Amino acid sequence: MKTFSFKVDPLTGEQYYEVYLRGQQLLTDPLLNKGSHFSIEERASLGLTGLLPHGVSSLEEEAARSLESYRRKPDDLERYLFLLGLLNRNETLFYKLLTENLIEMLPIVYTPTVGQACLLLSRIMRRARGVYIHPDNIAAIDTIFANVPLPEVQLIVVTDGERILGLGDLGADGMGIPVGKVSLYVAAGGLHPACCLPVCLDVGTNNDRLLADPLYLGFRRRRLEGEDYDRFVERFVLGVKRNFPNALIQWEDFAKHKAFRLLERYRERIPSFNDDIQGTGATALAALLTASRIKQKPLAAERVVIVGFGQAGVGTAKAIATYLQSQGLPPEEARKVVWPVDVQGLLCQDDPSLEPWQRPFARKREEIAGWKLKDPQKITLEDVVVNVKPTILVGVTAQPGLFSTKLLQQVAKEEARPVILALSNPTSKSECTPEDALAATGGRALVATGSPFPPVSLEDRTVETSQCNNLYVFPGVGLGTLVAKAPKITDEMFLAASEALSAMVSAEEQERGLLLPPLTSVRQVAREVAVAVAKKARDQGLGRLLADEEIEEVVSQAQWEPRFVPYRPGRPS
Ligand SMILES: NC(=O)C1=CN([C@@H]2O[C@H](COP(=O)(O)OP(=O)(O)OC[C@H]3O[C@@H](n4cnc5c(N)ncnc54)[C@H](O)[C@@H]3O)[C@@H](O)[C@H]2O)C=CC1
Ligand SMILES: CC(=O)C(=O)O
Ligand SMILES: [Mg+2]
């Protein structure tokens, strides 16, 4: 259902949209609606005469009006609803507002408020976005995709809602996450909103609260599992390949058992990646590379304890190992820098409950032979900290307060500049706050967190905390892969993303406590990451063979700025 086409006037070179909607229909189409910006000529030619007040506003004036309304909202959830309402009414205006007020609005459209919204989504949603695919409509997958009112889908963010941030199974209410991620693809990555599609694979939920809630809007059954689940996802992927042959798939917020399996099953078949595994790993590695510069100590010489060895934990471990191998370390040595901890404590090779993705990092029992342990059957996080003397501690468990003052003090006892990454989201799930980490380490820690935290005032200085969140990586990886037309996304492309990202942190920013570039530069970050990813793809023989300058040029050209273009009436061919 095409509603418009991009056009260029052959005589003047002017870009415009040929628009197929008229009147009220045009005003209710969020991609096309310009609100009070429609010119007098457009109002006449597109059936809008009399449907709008007299005044014609510039985009800047519309944005100023919206910002006033936004700031009148009493709380974050109301601000979220306002912004989502704007997105559903006038996308260009939404992105103008978001890009110009990113620091203020990011915590609303993304973590933490998006988590609060997902917990309530069936109760607060006013208009659905993207597509919902469930067992009762998967047979009509081609019809579902034909109903998508976008000219060409190139980017899909898909969830099945089973592990939404650290909040667990939220079923179809997890759709807030793909919607939020897509808004960053546009605001940071610069992808055009008309080519991004959020998708919910609503295969049911095992959340009893939702199943019992009469207002829950999702597929009210227990989750599809096993072969039925795999068949369902396969039908979705084949549908994507048939209908949107150039689209890239970003897997988001799946439960770990499915996430690892889907990543491996599809990564060679379709351009796709798992944001929680690979995007997080690449971002955490970038923060560690910056820390390594600050400490003037190579990453190979650090001892990294990763607590929570699921998607984000394994992704971070793999990113570290990939980097160290690129520096010449043999694979086994590279993996040994990481000490993996999960619910059972330190992961050891003789543990029969190890998951396949944990196994390569599990330690040999001989390595802990001399350790003093309270209970040799369970090597706790405290045991690991006392015996390994970590120089870097990474938390991805969704267990708030797991990094206690005592634990942090123990780390600081042995290391002058401990790196503490408390990456769990939303804010309420963080393993510790920057304030806790700095207080326990006498202000010596280099800290980053998954959700935003305010700066911490110490006696002699103020320390800022980077938000170490995959938002720094996924928009650029998506953009770079699409621009390169790469058929797959390799670990080396993610490594290139990490290196480009870390290289952007200036000495002055490092001085302020930042391990990643300031959030105000996310658009340049996406650009640099995209260029690095596209160059790496080319060097690996994937996708288009472009010179460096050509890659830089096509990435710049691909980044859309929120602005209105003129409309001319047309009929779909
Ligand atoms: N900052 C960022 O960019 C990202 C942050 N995250 C956050 O990280 C958290 C975990 O996400 P995933 O790794 O995707 O989940 P996951 O479910 O794949 O892994 C979490 C792991 O933590 C383990 N765990 C739970 N309690 C523990 C404890 N007390 N001690 C040790 N291990 C424990 C679980 O057994 C599981 O293996 C979530 O809060 C999520 O929001 C995830 C992706 C990106
Ligand atoms: C940031 C993110 O992807 C997560 O917390 O799941
Ligand atoms: Mg995620």
Image: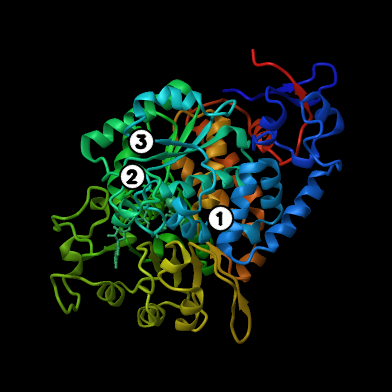
Name the amino acid type tagged 3: His
Can you see residue 245? no
**Is label 2 within 8 A of ligand 1 (CB to nearest ligand atom)?**
yes
- Residue 172, image x, y percentages: 40, 46
Name the amino acid type tagged 1: Ser
The mark nearer the N terminus, 1 or 3, is 3
Q: Residue at x 42, y 77 (%)?
A: 415
Question: Is residue 13 found left or right of 186 in the rendered image?
Answer: right
Q: Residue at x 27, y 47 (%)?
A: 257
Query: For the residue carrying disc 1, how many other residues have a C-alpha within 10 Å: few (<14), some (14-19), or many (20+)?
Result: many
Residue placed under numbered mark 2 in the picture: 259
Q: CA distance from mark 2 to mark 1?
A: 27 Å
Mark 3 touches mark 2? (CB < 8 Å): no
Element carrying mark 1: helix
Q: Residue at x 46, y 54 (%)?
A: 123
Residue 402's place in the image compared with 14, above or below, is below
Residue placed under numbered mark 3 in the picture: 134
- Can you say which quadrant of the picture contains the C terminus? top right
Element carrying mark 3: loop
Name the amino acid type tagged 2: Ala
Comparing labels 3 and 2, the label whose residue is closer to the camera: 3
The mark nearer the N terminus, 3 or 2, is 3
Element carrying mark 2: helix
| Residue at far bottom of view | 459
Instruction: Tell me the quarter of the picture where residue 378 sits.
Output: bottom left
- Residue 440, image x, y percentages: 45, 82
- Residue 520, image x, y percentages: 66, 57
Residue placed under numbered mark 1 in the picture: 502
